[in-house]
Amino acid sequence: MEALEIGAYLINEDLFKLFKKQLKKDFETSGVDAGFADNLLPEWLFLKEVIARALKPLSNSNQLLTSLLYRIDISESEIQHARALHGDMAFEELMAELIIKRILQKVVLKKKFSV
């Protein structure tokens, strides 16, 4: 899922509402504050920045970050692959990208297969 494709999904109001709901659920279930999720805008760079900022305090708590990534379903191999491709990107920004892509993927698949 590339930024252009993600942007197309984010402008769909229903999908974006589901995205915010899933993001908040995943963060809160992992014990991470998700108050930021209510004020998100459906814009790729904005989302990435806000989520990266929310991840910053987790740098000190490996357990919370691991729990969050497990809950969202981002594997260690996906992280390693992303780091290999984007080694110059800040860790929080890279994780924010992976989180956005995975949550959006979950939302799109749920919507597609729930009839």
Image: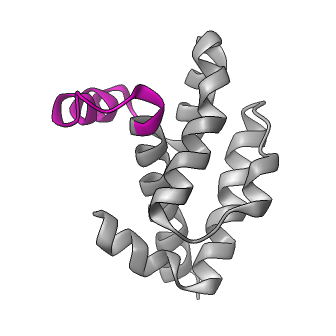
Kindly identify the residue that appears in the image at 48 percent across and 31 percent down.
Answer: 92
Q: Is residue 8 above or below residue 30?
A: below
Q: Position of residue 18 (x, y in %)?
A: 66, 71
Q: Position of residue 44 (x, y in %)?
A: 46, 63
Magenta-drawn stretch contains 91: yes
The residue at the far left in this view is: 85
Q: Is residue 63 above or below residue 91?
A: above
Q: Position of residue 54 (x, y in %)?
A: 66, 36
Left or right placement of residue 13 versus residue 12 in this view: right
Kindly identify the residue that appears in the image at 65 percent across and 12 percent down.
Answer: 61
| Residue situated in front as seen by the camera: 14 or 89 | 89
Q: Which residues are magenta?
A: 75-93
Instruction: Give the position of the N terminus as an image quadrant.
Output: bottom left
Q: Is residue 76 above or below residue 109?
A: above
Magenta-drawn stretch contains 101: no
Q: How is the image coloured?
A: one colour
Q: How many marks?
A: 0
The residue at the far bottom in this view is: 115
Kindly identify the residue that appears in the image at 26 percent across and 26 percent down.
Answer: 80
Give the quarter of the image for residue 81.
top left
Q: Position of residue 51 (x, y in %)?
A: 59, 44
| Residue situated in front as seen by the camera: 75 or 3 | 3
Left or right placement of residue 31 versus residue 13 in this view: right
- Dominant SS in magenta: helix
Instruction: Give the position of the C terminus as an image quadrant.
Output: bottom right
